[in-house]
Amino acid sequence: MGQTVSDEASPPSKDQITGDLAEKFARKCFEPLELYSFKDNFRSLADQEHNVRYLKEDTIARFLELPDILAVSPIIFHMLTYIGAFPFLRDSPAILGFQQMIMVVSIMTERYTKILAKGASSRKKLLFKSLAVYDRKLSEIGKQQRNTVAAGLDSTRHVPGFAIDEAGDDSDDGEAADDYDELVLAALDSLDINDAFTTGDLHAATTHGAMIPADNFRKLILLLLLLSPLDSQENLSSYAYRVTGSELEDLRVTAENVLSAFINAEKSPGITYHQFSDVLQPSFPFLFSGFNPLFEHFLFSKNLDLSKRKNDTPKATAPADVQPPLLHEEGQVLNLSVLSQLSFFIDGNELVRRLRLLYSGSEAGFSMGSFEAKVFNWRAPTILLVSGTRLSDPPSSGGSEGAFNDSLPPKRFPNGSPLVRDRLVFGALLRQPWRHTHRDCFGGDDMILFQLAPNHDVFPASTLNRDYVAFAKSPIANPGIYFGCPHPKASQSTRQSLRGLGPISLAIDSSFEFGVFTHDYASRGGAFSTSTSRKYNFQERFQVDEIEVWGCGGDEEARTQRERWEWEAREAEARRRVNLGTGDIAADRALLEMAGLIGANRSGGSMLS
């Protein structure tokens, strides 16, 4: 009796919680030398005002070496001032002091997963909200445009808009209080904070009315393309050549292709969380991976030199190891920007500095024989890329184009993109060695079929059927290379049969002159899954401009391929120069006549002539 509420321990303040969480992040997420370097970098970079030390936008842009020409610095700073308010995101934008930068670096490098395992999947929502603007009017414009597209949808007359542009149920927009951001809850739970503390920050749980402006996201994509091959020990300025001249133009074209996976930028003002979330995981699982090495630069101080000892005499500085180029050689399809685009959905460790051009149609010849000679002995994963120009509609009725169209079932679906964007690029990642197929396909459920231009789209392998890859040569009817199609049957008659096209498939004819990509969304997929962004049927018929096959691997894989080539060359030479034992052509001929292999009514003189 007599005890009052005031005698009970008062709950910690927001400042106390933020300080405790920052201290826990620093202790558990950083190594001692990394924390020392972080403190040293912050001291040297921070401005001070009224006893508050903080980082400014231009300071961060200069330290990270963000290229001015990309105009991305304000976008990055907006992200950081939001994330710096973690876990009380309602208080954003935050002044980027020491504790706030601890939060920023821990989250942007994904170091936070060491202590917040429960919230490991929630960085996606946090990044979205750090990029979004809460503009109800902008959101209503986007909703009206999506409703207009949905109301006017008519696949028989034109290419429909993106399905993610249609009116949809943004279930995340109406989340209740109990669906509070998982990452924030995990952070507070790690400190054993009473749940009552979370109720004052409920707006962090909702994305209602939030939208990433299309132009902002386009600029961010340009930066992410530049960052994708970055190593934590590399400076972004070492890629300065990629933001000038034709390299910059390649970046811009690629960024537009990537943006098309989220929205039709000509019709939609921005990206909602529903659109962002639906597309990110299947099509861009590594989109933000470049942030990890970029923000790890805060954990390396140039003032820290472990080679120095007290009273040591200065030693000559050892030359830095020279890194091999990001791409040993560029192709007509694959350049540095496309390499970065591939790394958004294929682990960069398989791609960067590890791709070798095995086959190029323009160099080795457009034929299955040349393809086989160059590619079949590579024992590691390969990436096939095919670029082409869309065929006219209605199709030509004469020549090789007419013959190709006659071998296909009648076209029932519209094109997959506007007519003005007629350059198409498709590809496939295959982890098994290439081989001939006679009745059954090969490949596995770790394959990926994809489109890079003019729309970025990814079609992962499924298990509905196993018609992954066929390399079919004559006497197969309609020989060629097939992905996602039933294996062609052997020709039974002179009557030409139609090519069997799978629901989600890519087929290239044996002359490597024409190809067709089919996306039958209504079928719900076959050997490959349907698109998550274009939820409608489409088909692209195109004339092949170039085919390239790139081997994923290093020197060891190249050595294995070279040894197999040399062995096959020796075997072929041995078969060609059969020696019957005498070394005398006349005697060898007599021996063959006695065996009844030549002479009389038999031919064969040309064998030894």
Image (tube, rainbow, N blue to C red):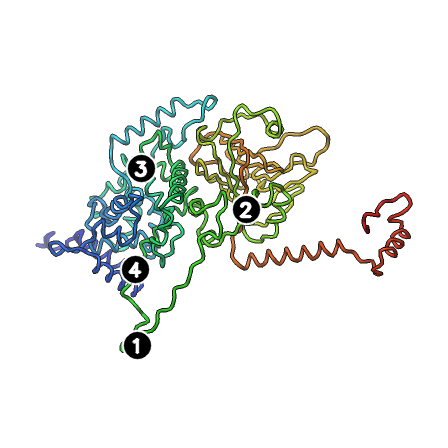
- Check if mark 1's residue and mark 4's residue have beta carbons within 8 Å: no
Secondary element under disc 2, as helix, strand or loop, is strand
Quick one: label 1 or label 2, which is nearer the N terminus?
A: 1
Amino acid under label 4? Leu
Q: Give the x, y percent position of residue 197.
A: 21, 48
In the image, which is nearer the foreground, mark 2 or mark 4? Answer: 2
* Residue that label 1 marks: 313
Where, by quadrant of the figure, is residue 572 drawn?
bottom right
User: Is 187 on the left-hand or right-hand side of 275?
Assistant: left
Mark 2 and mark 3 lie on one chain; the one further toward the N terminus is 3
Tell me the CA gap for discs 1 and 4. Answer: 27 Å
Say which element carries label 4: helix
Q: Pointers 1 and 3 in contact (CB under 8 A)?
A: no
The residues bearing labels 4 and 3 have C-alpha atoms spaced at a distance of 31 Å
Residue under numbered circle 2: 549
For label 1, count other residues whose C-alpha is less than 10 Å away and answer few (under 14), some (14-19) or many (20+): few
Image quadrant where one finds the N terminus: bottom left
Mark 1 or 3: in front is: 1
Looking at the image, is 349 positioned above or below residue 486? Answer: below
Q: x and y percent of residue 47 in the render?
A: 17, 55
Foreground tag (1 vs 4): 1
Question: What is the C-alpha distance between the residues marked 2 and 4?
Answer: 39 Å
Q: Residues within 10 Å of mark 3 (few under 14, many from 20)?
A: few
The reply to whether callout 2 and callout 3 are in contact (CB within 8 Å) is no
Precedes in sequence: disc 2 or disc 4: 4
* Marks 1/3: CA–CA distance: 54 Å
Callout 3, which amino acid? Asp
The residue that disc 4 covers is 299
Q: Amino acid at mark 2?
A: Val
Question: Which numbered tag is attached to residue 215?
Answer: 3
